[in-house]
């Protein structure tokens, strides 16, 4: 791929990469640094991209590791409160019956493979993630998108494993509700 074409494509990807990095790092400067490092890695070795995946997937994979590096280097130990924006017990009580079953069954999510490929889905998912409390979104991103293991997340954020699983459970509930309303309801 000609270098000028690569520059142009990377510039077009930059806003999406910044949103992705900011969602996890929650600091504009840190997100900008991670994106710059990822783009620089691609530009330093343009022949490493073999075209086996889309350029966006390739660069996002590099960015993922830059974000992980940043998280490991930051060594912040902020205690995560499970009910940072209020008590979630009302939400949970509304979704489940006394016997533990859900009040309503989840809506059918037909053809998830083809739907996941749609840009609109990721736009809606990103909006849903932004609606989560900051620390809850961060925990979800670390686990599900960055694929960090439980021990590493707990160490990074100063959580117990039980606390981590509660936060992940609540994040998934809220994301499910948001996606049901904003994506699957149509």
Image (cartoon, grey):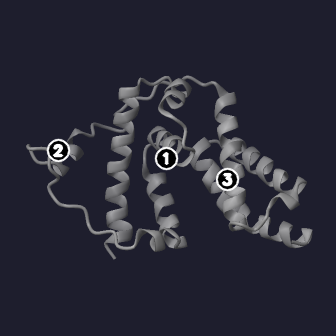
Lower position in the chain sequence, tag 1 or tag 2? 2
In the picture, the disc for residue 61 is: 3
Q: Image point 40% across, 27% down: which residue?
A: 161
Q: Residues within 10 Å of mark 1 (few under 14, many from 20)?
A: few
| Mark 1: secondary structure | helix
- The residue nearer to you, when weighing 75 against 151, is 151
Lower position in the chain sequence, tag 3 or tag 2? 3
Comparing marks 1 and 2, which lies closer to the viewer? 1
Place of residue 27 in the rendered image (x, y in percent of width and height, measured from the top left):
64, 42
Instruction: Name the quadrant of the N terminus.
Output: bottom right
Place of residue 46 in the rendered image (x, y in percent of width and height, measured from the top left):
87, 60
Side of 86 where 71 appears, left or right = right
Cα distance between the residues tagged 1 and 3: 14 Å
**Residue at label 1?**
144
Instruction: Name the quadrant of the C terminus.
Output: bottom left
| Mark 2: secondary structure | helix
Q: Residues within 10 Å of mark 3 (few under 14, many from 20)?
A: few
Q: Residues within 10 Å of mark 2 (few under 14, many from 20)?
A: few
Q: Is residue 88 above or below residue 44?
A: above
Cα distance between the residues tagged 1 and 2: 25 Å
């Amino acid at each position: 791929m000609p270098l000028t074409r690569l520059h142009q494509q990377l510039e077009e990807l930059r806003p999406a990469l910044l949103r992705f990095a900011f969602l996890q790092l929650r600091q504009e400067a840190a997100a900008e640094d991670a994106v710059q490092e990822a783009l620089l890695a691609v530009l330093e070795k343009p022949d490493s991209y073999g075209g086996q995946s889309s350029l966006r997937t390739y660069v996002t994979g590099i960015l993922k590791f830059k974000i992980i590096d940043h998280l490991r280097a930051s060594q912040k130990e902020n205690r995560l409160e499970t009910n940072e924006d209020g008590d979630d017990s009302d939400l949970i009580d509304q979704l489940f019956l006394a016997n533990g079953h859900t009040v309503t069954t989840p809506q059918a999510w037909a053809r998830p493979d083809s739907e996941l490929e749609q840009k609109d889905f990721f736009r809606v998912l990103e909006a849903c993630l932004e609606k989560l409390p900051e620390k809850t979104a961060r925990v979800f991103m670390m686990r599900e998108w960055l694929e960090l293991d439980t021990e590493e997340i707990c160490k990074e954020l100063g959580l117990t494993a039980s606390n981590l699983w509660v936060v992940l459970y609540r994040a998934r509930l809220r994301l499910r509700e948001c996606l049901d309303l904003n994506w699957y309801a149509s």
